[in-house]
Image: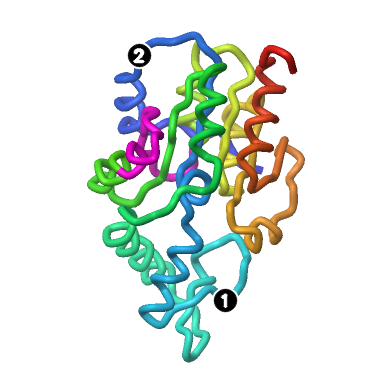
Amino acid sequence: MSEPTPPSRAILDQIALLPASRRPLVVCDVDEVILHLIRPLERYMAAIGLCFLSSTYKLTGNIARQDTRTALNAQEARRVIETFFDTECRHQEMVEGADEALHRVSSLADVVLLTNLPGSHNKPVRQTLLAQMGITYPLLINSGPKGGAVAALAAGRPEPVVFIDDSPTNHSSVHASLPSARLIQFVADSRFRGSLDIEPHISLLTGDWGQTADFIEDILGAPGR
């Protein structure tokens, strides 16, 4: 079981710049949630002779050389991911329906985007790409498990905070740090989503933004629901 994690100084400094609010809060990841990650990453890896060994939800031990099926070590895998983001993140495509669903949700709650984007230097590129898609909510750059950041964001907000992310690690972290949060595990790629078991703390496992918006409206009490 995960232990509560304290927020980093870097994330607290970013949170301090947000306007004060007592509205409900939805904290949403970006990669494989708002923007496709698996699909472009597979294309990028294929071009340099790499592949996923399986649809298991992990990177270390799952990225391998196509010719030998030999897995990269943790440092090599991390370098692949960092280089991918440095060169390709400006070209990521939106997951269908993300913009419309977030717009619906934003009528009921503040939306904050919380991403573990490798390299803070990529933040302006990501903000520009999202803005071109009509997604202009505050973007915070985190590092490591997200529980501490979400708990800090939730301070002074009505319960429950809604957290949307693809990563099992981040969901476990948020559950440990903010047990009252409602957790939506969103994975756009059906193969990787299908490899996941639904943990007891997960309220919804999905890859559909319409379903996600409906679920959040039910939680937050949208008029007519």
Residue 150 part of the magenta segment: no
Residues drawn in magenta: 129-146
> Pointer 1: what residue?
53
- Residue drawn at the location 43% of the way across and 36% of the way down: 114
Q: Which mark is residue 9?
A: none
The residue beneath circle 2 is: 19
Amino acid on which the number 2 mark rests in the picture: Pro
Q: Earlier in the sequence, mark 1 or mark 2?
A: 2
Numbered disc total: 2
Tell me the quarter of the image containing the N terminus: top right
Return the residue nearer the eye: 148 or 114: 114
Q: Residue at x 42, y 41 (%)?
A: 115
Residue 135 in magenta stretch:
yes
Of residues 34 and 143, the one nearer the viewer is 34
Q: Is residue 133 left or right of residue 146?
A: left
Residue 58 at what x, y percent from top left?
55, 62
Q: Residue at x 47, y 69 (%)?
A: 42
From what the image shows, is residue 99 above or below residue 16?
below
Disc 1 is placed on an element classified as: loop
The location of residue 111, given as percent across then percent down, is 48, 25
> Tag 2's secondary structure?
loop
Give how far apart the Cα atoms at labels 1 and 2 are: 44 Å
Left or right: where 44 falls relative to 55: left
Q: Quadrant of residue 26?
A: top right
Residue occupying the point 48% across, 20% down: 110
Given the image, on which type of amino acid does mark 1 rest?
Leu
**Who is closer to the viewer here, 109 or 166?**
109
